[in-house]
Amino acid sequence: MTFDVLIIGGGLVGASLAASLKSSELNLALVESQTPGIHKKDLDNRIYAISPGTAAFLSQCNIWQQLDKSRIQPVETMRIFGDMGMEFDFSAYPLGLPELAFILENQVLQLTLWQELQEQDNLTLFHPARCSHLDWQDDAAYLRLEDGRTLKTNLVIGADGGNSWVRQQAGIVAPPTLYNQDAVVANFMIEKTHRNTAFQWFQQDGILALLPLPQKSVSMVWSVSPEKAKILLNLSHEDLCAQVTSASHHHLGTMQLVTPPVAFPLRSLYLPQIVKSRLALVGDAAHNIHPLAGQGVNLGFRDARQLARILMEREAHRDCGDINLLRCYERSRKEDIFSMLHATDLLKKLFNNGNPVLRSIRNLGLASANHITPLKKMLALHALN
């Protein structure tokens, strides 16, 4: 079985990349170890802030139009608080924008993507299928599956997440930066309306974000030490609600837990390269960032969008796995990845620091920035990509 492009990993980024190549003449394959489950009515714990740029990309892939609009929550305002009461906020309307982002559940987007992929004529899906061995030769790359089948391709795209098997097979190695933090996530019903507002509190012992969801509910992402994460996970539902209500200064009133909390460790990862001959990495396989800016998944979608554009616009005779072609992709993504990773890393280190002088400076900076309209507009426009 021979293909022009082989995508390993069928999560959001890998699936969107396959969908974005639907109109190409490329013969595609996608290998995924799991098959998305049945759509659930219950809220998903995995929530993403989708930028307008990502929404436009998904619309081009014929995905955004098919989503259940009742499960999409636009964000019109952001309010960010320091640990001394200082506030930074910006809204879409004064900037001439309809919204700043959309909050969407992972399962809603994932299942819609897979439904579209199953109808795609130039795509062969292998799922559930597990990879056994990956070998790069001058003429092609060869993937052997655990069931014995071998797939030949001009280009392997690793879209298989933060612990990428493809990246390991390619020998692309870099030590991750461990933040000594876990992200505790859960969903709540709220007493007061969120008014399409996303809230974030930078605290000395962590970063709390409450993202608006439809029907007077919010999604929590609380980045805290592993020790505090363990405490939060072991609290009764009533005590957890009380803790979150207190930490959010009662902005949304009393809270009721909808989905039990879960936690995952946080880290950042910057690779010296994201391409080799006949290989390109996208999404979490290519980079990991702190979730405080809510931009990790959008960074991955921008990888998919750019790589698809380069493959679609290449000369008809040009090999998809040509290293010079793939370096164009790597160069085009380097600045975006580097700036987002280091900006989130700096913010995390700046606010999770007990130095009293630094504490005063960071809160003063937050308050000062709140009065600089051009800065607000620049930040908002960057978040739209």
Image (cartoon, rainbow, N blue to C red):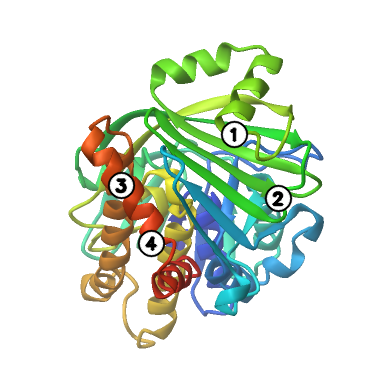
- For label 4, the crowd category at 10 Å Cα-Cα, with few meaning under 14, some 14 to 19 and many 20 or more, is some
Circle 1 SS class: loop
Return the residue nearer the eye: 139 or 377: 377
Q: Can residue 126 be seen in this view?
A: no
Contact check, label 1 and label 2, Cβ < 8 Å: no
Q: Can residue 237 be seen in this view?
A: yes
Residue underneath mark 2: 108
Q: Which residue is drawn at 47% across and 20% down?
A: 229
Circle 2 SS class: helix
Contact check, label 2 and label 3, Cβ < 8 Å: no
Image coordinates of residue 105 in percent, x first then y, are: 66, 47
Q: Residue at x 26, y 59 (%)?
A: 338
Residue underneath mark 3: 362
Q: Residue at x 46, y 73 (%)?
A: 377
Disc 2 marks a residue whose amino acid type is Val
Q: Which residue is drawn at 81% across and 47% down?
A: 215
Image coordinates of residue 315 in percent, x first then y, are: 35, 88
- Marks 2/3: CA–CA distance: 38 Å
Image coordinates of residue 335 in percent, x first then y, are: 26, 67
Closer to viewer: mark 4 or mark 2: 4
Q: Which mark is residue 196?
A: none
Q: Residue 369 carries which label?
A: 4
Disc 1 marks a residue whose amino acid type is His
- Marks 4/2: CA–CA distance: 36 Å
| Vertical side of 131 occupied by 308: above or below | below
- Which of marks 3 and 2 precedes in the sequence? 2
In the rendered view, does 46 fall on the left or right side of 3? right
- Which of marks 4 and 3 precedes in the sequence? 3
Q: Residue 249 carries which label?
A: 1
